[in-house]
Amino acid sequence: MELKFDTSKTYAIALEGGGAKGAYEAGVTVVASYPGTPSTEITKNIVKYDEIYAEWAPNEKVAMEAAFGASLAGRRSFCGMKHVGLNVAADPLFTISYTGVNAGMVIGVADDAGMHSSQNEQDSRHYAMGSKTMMLEPSDSAECLEYTKKAFELSEKFDTPVIIRLTTRVAHSRSAAPVADRVDNGLKEYVKNPQKYVMMPANAKGKHVVVEQRILDQIAYCEEGAEGLNTVEYNSKKIGVITSGICYQYAKEVYGEEASILKLGMVWPLPEKMIKDFASKELKNDDITECTLILTMERKQKEKVLANFENTHIENVYALADFVDDELETLDPYGGNLQSYGLCYESLHKSIEKLVNILN
């Protein structure tokens, strides 16, 4: 059976169909998965494409190893599983992260937040961090199609498997999505290279350096926006939301245009500078009204605010310690050692607990 799509039209596609269509358009040839809701339907949709060989594996570990074998042989491959299945596949995942890939390899993992059909609740982002593997997270079905295609490009660009993280709410959604023709990537040549693919201790030690440099290269890539995967929507400066996946849809529904949003399509590695820049926008006179409460860590910072911002009202500007009736002010740790940052955190934590009670 072959699915026919008119590429001039936009279709309402379910996420599992989006993942399958994305894999098809990306030129995937081999798919090996293990069933588990909410990931099962992706592979069930993939089998409808005649150009793709698809199989159910005995377990997730075998599925990942079969997909890696196809990648090694020069064909783009995909494997799918749910969050608990990634536990079973952890052994090959951590090693494949070291070896890298030949043709692109993408791992689709569906986290069942809320345990609708699972024995526990897990966050697969911890596996991405632990295995040093790039992870993307779409917020709807259209992005699932787009991100799946992008994941194969990134897999080959950075010589790494790429994980696409899904969640139950996204997996059971539908979105309008444009479609495209399948890309024929051909057969990528396999080059025998034991230093790259045989992870004996001597080779693994050398590859560890490669993996660490790869993470740095990926961070540089995502700091630049990751080609549109990480985006900022500037609206009101009063509220800032850093989010990804289905939580982006929730934030848009609740806040609309009343909050600025940093949406992370690439959830690992994180664009630390991009996050810091988003969270620390410069305070301007236009941001201050007669009702604006301004709290500073140090008393000298309070005096600086009063001197530099003409819209401030002295009765609305406080050092945090004075506002919550603490004896000692919180010292700014900037330029200090790690211990000074730890002391700052402890002081802020106690003061903010008091602040919450006062404001409530």
Image (cartoon, helix red, strand yellow):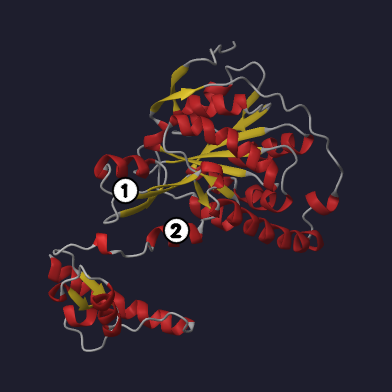
Q: Secondary structure at mark 2?
A: helix
| Left or right, 81 with reference to 258 | right
Residue shown at 14% from the left, 63% from the top: 291
Q: Residue at x 57, y 17 (%)?
A: 48
Residue 132 visible from this viewpoint: no
Q: x, y (%) of residue 4?
A: 56, 11
Q: Which of the pair 84/357 is nearer the observer?
A: 357
Residue sitting nearer the eye, 31 or 330: 330
Amino acid, disc 1: Asn
User: In this image, 269 relative to 326: left or right?
Assistant: right
Quadrant location of residue 209?
Answer: bottom right
Task: Find numbered disc 1 in the image and state the secondary structure of the residue it sits on.
Answer: loop
The residue lying at 36 percent from left, 77 percent from top is: 345
Asked if disc 1 and disc 2 are in contact, CB closer than 8 Å, the reply is no
Q: Nearer the viewer, residue 217 or 171?
A: 217
Question: In the drawing, what numbered circle is on residue 235?
Answer: 1
Q: Residue under circle 2?
A: 275
Q: Nearer the viewer, mark 1 or mark 2?
A: 1
- Who's the residue at 87% across and 44% down the image? 192
Q: Picture coordinates of residue 191 (x, y %)?
A: 86, 41
The quarter of the picture where the C terminus appears is bottom left
**Which mark is on residue 345?**
none
Left or right: where does residue 303 sit relative to residue 169? left
